[in-house]
Amino acid sequence: MKRVFGTVEAVFDGLYLVSALTIGIILLLRASNHGVRALAGIMALVLAGGDAFHLIPRIKLILTGREEQLRPILGRGKQITSITMTLFYVLLWHVGVSLFAPAAIIFWSTLVYGLAAIRIFLCMLPQNRWKDRFPPVDWTIGRNIPFFLLGLVVGGLFFRFRALNPAAGRMWIPIFLSFAFYLPVVLWANKNPKIGMLMLPKTMCYLWMLVICLAL
C-alpha cells in the first residue's frame, strides 16, 4: 500500500510540474501587449522551476528508495522551493495590483516586500538544517510566520477587490485554501508524517491559481 501511494505521489508531482510549466509558457505566448499575462507567465515559471528542485529529487527518492543519498539534495531543494514560493507570492501581489490598481497601495507593497525579505533571510540561515532528517520544528514554524502573513496580505488584496475583475475575483479562495492545507503540515507533520499528504491539495490550489491566470 505504501508503494502504491508513493507511485501516486510521483505521478502527481510529475503532472503538476508539467502542468505549471505548460501554463507558464501559454501565458507568455499570449502576453503580447498584455503585461498582466506576462507577469503571470513569469510567476508560473518561477513556481514550476523552484518546485522542480524539490520534486524531481522527491520523485527519484520514491522510485529508488535511496533516502540517505538523496537527503542533501532534497534538503537543498526544499530551501530553494521555499524561496521561490515566496517570490511567487510577490509576483502574484503585483498581478493583483496591475488588475485592480488600488489607491494608496504603497504601504501594502512595502509590507509585502518586507515580509518576503524576512522570509528569504530566515530560509538562508544555517539553523534551519535543511539537510537533516528531522529539521528543528521551531525554525520551521518561525520561517513560515512571515510567509503566512504574506499570503494573508496577497489573498486580502484579491478578496477586497474581487468585484472589480470577475476573472480574478476568485483568486483569494485558492490562496487561503493553500495556507489552510499547509498550516497543519508546518505544525504537526513532524509528529505524524501522514499529515504531509495535505501538500497534495495544497499543490492543486497553486494549479487553480494558474488556471485563473489563463482567464485574465
Image (spheres, rainbow, N blue to C red):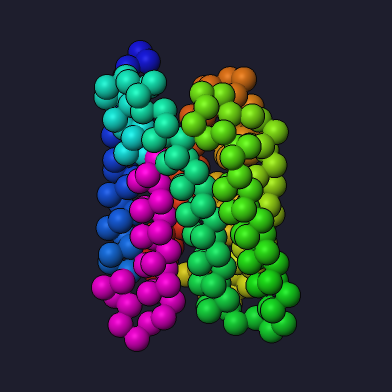
Q: Is residue 1 above or below residue 129?
A: above
Decide whether residue 34 is among the magenta residues: yes
The C terminus, quarter of image:
bottom left
Q: Nearer the viewer, residue 191 or 37?
A: 191
Does residue 151 appear in this view?
A: no
Residue placed at 46% from the left, 47% from the top?
81
Q: Is residue 12 left or right of residue 133?
A: left
Q: Is residue 205 above or below residue 137?
A: below
Quarter of the rendering containing residue 186: top right
**Residue with the most extreme front position:** 126
Task: Please report the bounds of the magenta region as a residue range.
Answer: 28-54
**Residue with the most extreme top position:** 1
Residue placed at 64% from the left, 29% from the top?
136
Residue placed at 29% from the left, 30% from the top?
60
Q: Is residue 104 above or below residue 157?
A: below
Does residue 17 appear in this view?
A: yes
Residue placed at 41% from the left, 80% from the top?
35
